[in-house]
Amino acid sequence: MAEKKLAGQSALVTGASSGIGEGVALALGEAGANVIVNYNSNPDSANAVVEKIKAFGSKAIAIQADVSKEESVQSMFKQTIKEFGTIDILVNNAGLQKDAKFDEMTLAQWQTVIDINLTGQFLCAREAIREFLRRGPVPERSLATGKIICMSSVHELIPWAGHVNYASSKGAIKMLMQSLAQEYGDRKIRVNSICPGAIQTPINRAAWETPQALNSLMTLIPYNRIGQPSDIGRLAVFLASDDSDYITGTSIFIDGGMTVFEGFATGG
Ligand code: NAD
């Protein structure tokens, strides 16, 4: 049985009804946290994640909220605090892509990605920090007063033609995360980012669903396998637990080596 490193803590994971969010919610639940499974539009999938977490012996509930809407986020946090008393861990995971060549990108494609990927993280982080400050430290539960994990991407570092809106949102998350770590470090709030490479989820189906696409993807990944949501889940447990108590303001890349730029292995 997995060690219950997060026993007694409450975690909210946004966009947790699929992909990486689901993998993170399951890993946190398995580590003993009570988990809020946020979803926007798929209650059945969210409820399936809730049932899996309950099977680990942790509490879980699904809450609908659109992370890009202030009222929706505030009502989700109210409900979370009503159900679980407080929140110790926020995983800002919800995100999407609206890909287009830059000269053809509509304002709506730009704005939707910024609203969900960036403003969504602002709105959720602000509510979480308000609750951490209101509640104060509980050292018997965790050394830190609160922990925020931002789901960024290798594209906070690697430019991405055809995905300028997405890459811009992830680049901005780096500064959101680091500025929050700077502003609230003395209140014992830790803020870090996870930067996944290619993880097998619905967001990038086109990159892995045919053998040709997968082969082409492997030319970018020295470790020669696509990542799984459970890879990210294990890192999220580490960043949420006291094992990482001296880590704040950092982006951790988890990418099978994508950011060592494999194209340079035989030339340059
Ligand atoms: P996914 O599409 O399975 O998950 C995204 C989730 O966000 C979905 O559950 C979706 O319903 C939810 N969501 C979208 N808009 C929302 C809104 N307005 N409010 C609440 N939830 C909303 O894809 P994923 O790969 O699991 O993506 C999760 C995160 O990981 C994203 O931030 C993405 O940018 C990031 N990421 C993914 C990869 C990858 O290779 N899969 C790589 C780097 C970063």
Image: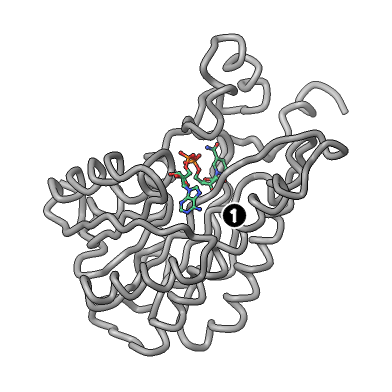
* 237 relative to 106, above or below: below
On the rendered structure, is 19 left or right of 173?
left
At which x and y percent is residue 101?
Answer: 81, 34
Determine whether 175 is above or below 135 in the image. above
**Residue corresponding to mark 1:** 117
| Occupied quadrant, residue 100 | top right
Q: Compared with residue 119, is residue 88 higher up or lower down, i.e. above or below?
A: below
Residue at mark 1: C-beta within 8 A of ligand 1:
yes
Q: Tell me: 241 left or right of 264.
A: left
Q: Nearer the viewer, residue 105 or 267?
A: 105
Residue found at x 69% / y 54%? 111
Query: Could you tell me the amino acid type at mark 1?
Result: Asn
Residue 80 x, y percent position in the rendering: 29, 70
The answer to which of 180 and 38 lies nearer the viewer is: 38
Report the residue at 36% width, 72% height from top. Answer: 77
Toward the viewer: 205 or 137? 205
Q: Which corner quadrant of the image does residue 160 belong to?
A: top right
